[in-house]
Image (spheres, rainbow, N blue to C red):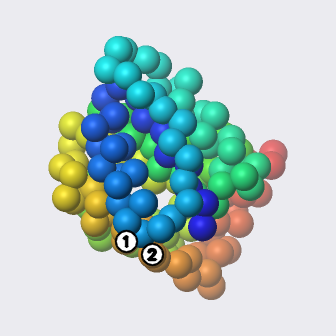
Amino acid sequence: MKVILASDHGGINLSKEIISLLEELNIEYEDTGCNCEDSVDYPDYGIPAAERVANGEFDRGILICGTGIGMSIAANKVKGIRAALVHDVFSAKATREHNDSNMLTMGERVVGPGLAREIVQTWLGTDFQGGRHANRIGKVTDYESN
């Protein structure tokens, strides 16, 4: 599995925690920033990362900003992306099982480092169930194509 990671200034500390987890799990990743505390615009980081997941360069992506909301909105503008804003372990599991989410967004100002690690580990380790859920994802994909 290859994972792309991006954050804005509001998510750099949590992204460092997630990088540590990815290294512990021996998961190949690329961190595309930002690596500064100066104010930056989340679409400048979230959209390019989402495009790289959508084009198949990465299997999944993790985006972090202050709340996770901005990154989620930006990523979901990219065709083929199903970014889920997650702040609990149950939702991390459900969004993989039911929605086949390919991007995870979180907020550093909302989720602490320990919980974030649990969320990411659950999200990365959960498979899509398919079945009736695949039909629903197909409806979303069909709508995107129009």
At numbered mark 2, what does the secondary structure look like: helix, strand or loop?
A: helix
Residue to which mark 1 is pinned: 122
At a point 45% along the width and 75% down the height, the residue shown is 125
The quadrant of the image that shows the N terminus is bottom right
Does residue 124 appear to the left or right of 134 in the view shown? left
Does residue 144 appear to the left or right of 112 in the view shown? right
Percent position (x, y) of residue 36? 37, 22
Q: Residues within 10 Å of mark 1 (few under 14, many from 20)?
A: some
Q: Residues within 10 Å of mark 2 (few under 14, many from 20)?
A: few
Relative to 96, say whether 80 is above or below: above
The quadrant of the image that shows the C terminus is top right
At a point 42% along the width and 47% down the height, the residue shown is 105
Percent position (x, y) of residue 109? 21, 37
Amino acid at the residue labelled 1: Thr
In this view, the residue in front, 86 or 37, is 37
Q: Is residue 132 visible?
A: no
At a point 27% along the width and 56% down the height, the residue shown is 116
Amino acid at the residue labelled 2: Gly
Does residue 95 appear to the left or right of 3 in the view shown? left
At a point 41% along the width and 28% down the height, the residue shown is 35
The quarter holding residue 70 reads top left
Residue to which mark 2 is pinned: 125
Residues at circles 1 and 2 in contact by the CB criterion of under 8 Å = yes
At numbered mark 1, what does the secondary structure look like: helix, strand or loop?
A: helix
Does residue 1 appear to the left or right of 18 in the view shown? right
| Residue 31, label in figure | none
- Gap between marks 1 and 2 measured at Cα: 5 Å
